[in-house]
Image (cartoon, rainbow, N blue to C red):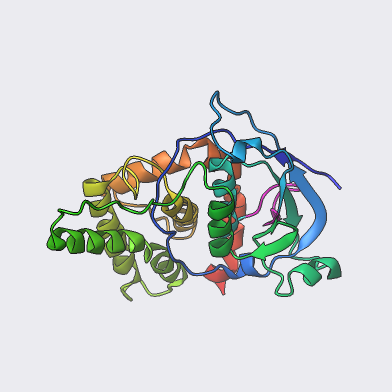
Amino acid sequence: MSTAKITPSAASFATSIKHLAGIQLPRCQSTIFTSNSTKFRAPRRGFTVSMAASIETPLEVCVKQSITTPNKLGDCPFTQRVLLTLEEKHLPYDMKFVDLSNKPDWFLKISPEGKVPLIKLDEKWVPDSDVISQALEEKFPKPPLTTPPEKASVWVYLLLLLTYSFLIQNRHACGSKIFPKFVAFLKSKDSGDGTEQALLDELTAFNDYLKENGPFINGNEVSAADLSLGPKLYHLEIALGNYKNWSIPDSLSYMKSYMKSIFSRESFINTRALKEDVIEGWRPKVMG
């Protein structure tokens, strides 16, 4: 079995809101291991303050294998979200590649639905990127990727508390509709069906949010919400550029700056899928 251990480089400490909701990709949800795996040990920057940094045994993670290049990571944004979380928390991990054409019984025993991502925590296999991200936050709380409970002063007016609570709730949902709108537009065969405008409306709303609250969703620091949305925007950029010759308008400058910042992070570069895989991964959706 070929392997590669990854010890992610240290990134900025983050505080965050809840992850963004999104629809599941069928190709991610039906992938199955092969016997291949890859381990990496990436360079680490010069500071260590977290529990995560002391972990020596790599965490095993089931990931989608590339359909264009042997022994490379595939094109599942939900898997990348988990890998980004591991990277940002400086946790070493061992990727177990998944081959769609080969579904061994031993994998189906630990994942009856045959889905990735899947991670082994405390000798138990945990599925679903939502559950995995939360489990990692609870088990390895430093550096934090969630927003700590706000400590309101006793003299703060009730109205201000209610207003702040409302704003926080809105931030939890910020950008959550972008991915399904992207998928609808990508699959659309009718240029006049409104799917393009629906996507533009969501992107514009997110751009406006970033203008007032950015550069990231939770302010100055990258959070779990960004780790969820970033891979989806990566798919959006590549798939729409290839199949629709479409790109995000220059007028959405905060949106474009956000994407550039996320995509250029070392953790993202370490975990992104090949462009060719993203294109091929979406082909059945576009052509079907």
List x then y, in percent, for residue 267.
54, 40
Position of 182 relative to 74 (above/below): below
The answer, for residue 81, to whether it is visible in the render is no
Residue drawn at the location 33% of the way across and 64% of the way down: 199
List x then y, in percent, for residue 99.
75, 60
Residue drawn at the location 74% of the way across and 42% of the way down: 57
Residue drawn at the location 71% of the way across and 55% of the way down: 65
**Magenta stretch: includes residue 263:** no
List x then y, in percent, for residue 105.
85, 70
The answer, for residue 287, to whether it is visible in the render is yes
**Magenta stretch: includes residue 64:** yes
- The magenta stretch is 61-74
Q: Is residue 189 left or right of residue 174?
A: right
Position of 50 relative to 250 (above/below): above
Q: Could you say which is closer to the camera, residue 138 or residue 225?
A: 138
Predominant SS along the magenta part: loop
